[in-house]
């Protein structure tokens, strides 16, 4: 089986070669890690016998296969080169694979791969869709096995965490979408980049894994049910302060810990973090800004400048504050009355953001310690919302922040009802992706 797979993989490499002028160079002159330069082949002596001719050829082919396997497993691969028929066979055998992944049984997985490798590997690597399915079921031990690739049942193949899936996203995007912190940590340890963006017609374009985590957190039912967007469009007043404090109280709930943990981990490995934060601020996305500020506040304090926010020697919060103030000042200087109404709304959002930055700058460290103290799985040790409310309120008061008027209330929060289970949801996502692959329907 190994020999046959190698023959198929070599055929794939050859078909790629047909589209290249030189090995390793694409038509536009850029290096292609899927098809790296092959080693030179030494000519055989003219008077040598058949065995002497075959030996150097075999040695050259072994070197070439090793170069292909290493390059394809360790570089950023865009796009996915797996033929459709290979993924189709994988989906056909998926019902037998899923129970193994749900149990995260390494020995069973290796036996399964040894018997069904043609559906799970192509071109000297384990296919991106195979790794994608392992991530969907949070099979961390199986993921480690395919990322390392040392087991003999894998026949020298391993998975590349930086190989784009056929849907246009990478392994970290999928793990971020599911908020699988342990899986994200594993992928990062094995070279996954947090700075690769989505691409193509099947996903929202230009998203980092960090964006996926922040966007999904911001759509949490607690936030959607409790925060009325119209509350943001007010002067820097009572409603403004209460809105910010309520938002912070909700983000400090034990149920939100996994979302903030995921965002914090991805932010730690994301380049130009302040630039990404500035984009949320410019777009007036208060909740997104709060999620990123609160979860990554420790890292932000250590940053000194950002391209989008202008050059600065201040620490991150100072840089962000200057950026918001500069934008507010710029709006005030624009006198065109035709633009005043939308500009006024934008200024109000920036006023709210400025207060939000101030609150997290002052109380963020204490809030972060409290959030991290929650159990990883809230149901292990249930904490009443009233108790959380009291504790967070004390932290905020200790740093000079008080609710005004009627105060704030987080007593009417309800969990999700009538939704797919954690096992059913990823399965449904993949089913939708397969059915609608040609219909330009986003998967993330």
Image: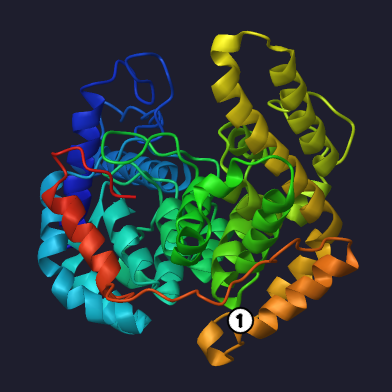
SS for callout 1: helix
From the viewer's side, name the closer residue of 251 and 50.
251
In this image, 172 relative to 3: left or right?
Answer: right
Task: Give me the residue at 46% from left, 63% from top.
Answer: 225
- When the figure is inspected, residue 197 is found, relative to residue 262, above or below; the finding is above
Residue 127 visible to an observer of this rendering? no
- When the figure is inspected, residue 267 is found, relative to residue 49, above or below; the finding is below
- When the figure is inspected, residue 167 is found, relative to residue 313, above or below; the finding is below
Residue 69 visible to an observer of this rendering? yes
Asked which colour scheme the image uses, the reply is: rainbow
Outermost front residue: 405
Task: Give me the residue at 11% from left, 51% from top.
Answer: 435
From the viewer's side, name the closer residue of 136 and 213.
213
Q: Quadrant of residue 399?
A: bottom right
Place of residue 17 in the rendered image (x, y in percent of width and height, measured from the top left): 25, 26
Place of residue 434 in the rendered image (x, y in percent of width and height, measured from the top left): 15, 52
Task: Give me the residue at 18% from left, 55% from top.
Answer: 432
Total count of labels = 1
Q: Which residue is mark 1?
A: 385
């Amino acid at each position: 089986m190994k020999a046959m797979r190698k023959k198929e993989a070599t055929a794939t490499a050859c078909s790629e070669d047909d589209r290249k002028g030189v090995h390793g160079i694409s038509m536009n002159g850029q290096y292609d890690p899927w098809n790296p330069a092959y080693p030179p082949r030494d000519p055989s002596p003219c008077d040598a016998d058949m065995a002497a001719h075959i030996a150097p050829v075999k040695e050259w082919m072994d070197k070439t296969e090793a170069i292909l396997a290493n390059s394809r497993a360790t570089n950023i691969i865009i796009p996915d080169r797996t033929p459709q028929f290979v993924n189709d066979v994988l989906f056909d055998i998926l019902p037998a694979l899923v129970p193994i992944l749900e149990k995260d049984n390494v020995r069973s997985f290796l036996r399964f791969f040894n018997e069904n490798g043609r559906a799970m590997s192509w071109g000297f690597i384990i296919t991106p869709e195979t790794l994608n399915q392992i991530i969907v079921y949070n099979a961390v031990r199986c993921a480690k096995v395919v990322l390392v690739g040392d087991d003999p049942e894998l026949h020298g193949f391993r998975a590349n965490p930086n190989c784009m899936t056929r849907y246009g996203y990478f392994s970290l995007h999928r793990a971020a979408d599911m908020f699988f912190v342990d899986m994200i940590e594993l992928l990062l340890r094995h070279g996954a980049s947090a700075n690769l963006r989505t691409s193509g017609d099947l996903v929202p374009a230009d998203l980092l894994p960090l964006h996926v985590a922040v966007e999904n957190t911001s759509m949490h039912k607690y936030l959607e049910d409790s925060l009325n967007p119209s509350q943001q469009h007010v002067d820097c007043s009572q409603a403004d302060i209460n809105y910010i404090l309520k938002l912070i109280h909700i983000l400090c709930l034990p149920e939100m810990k996994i979302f903030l943990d995921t965002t914090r981990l991805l932010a730690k490995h994301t380049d130009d973090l302040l630039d990404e934060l500035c984009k949320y601020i410019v777009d007036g996305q208060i909740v997104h800004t709060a999620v990123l500020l609160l979860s990554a506040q420790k890292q932000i304090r250590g940053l000194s400048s950002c391209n989008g926010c202008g050059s600065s020697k201040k620490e991150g919060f100072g840089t962000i504050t200057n950026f918001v103030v500069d934008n507010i000042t710029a709006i005030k200087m624009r006198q065109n009355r035709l633009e005043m109404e939308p500009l006024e709304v934008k200024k109000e959002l920036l006023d709210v953001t400025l207060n939000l930055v101030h609150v997290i700058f002052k109380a963020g460290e204490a809030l972060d310690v409290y959030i991290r103290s929650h159990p990883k799985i809230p149901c292990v040790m249930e904490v009443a919302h009233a108790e959380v409310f009291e504790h967070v309120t004390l932290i905020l008061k200790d740093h000079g922040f008080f609710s005004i008027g009627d105060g704030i209330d987080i007593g009417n929060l309800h969990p999700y009802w009538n939704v797919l289970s954690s096992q059913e949801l990823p399965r449904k996502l993949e089913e939708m992706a397969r059915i609608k692959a040609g219909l330009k329907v986003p998967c993330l």
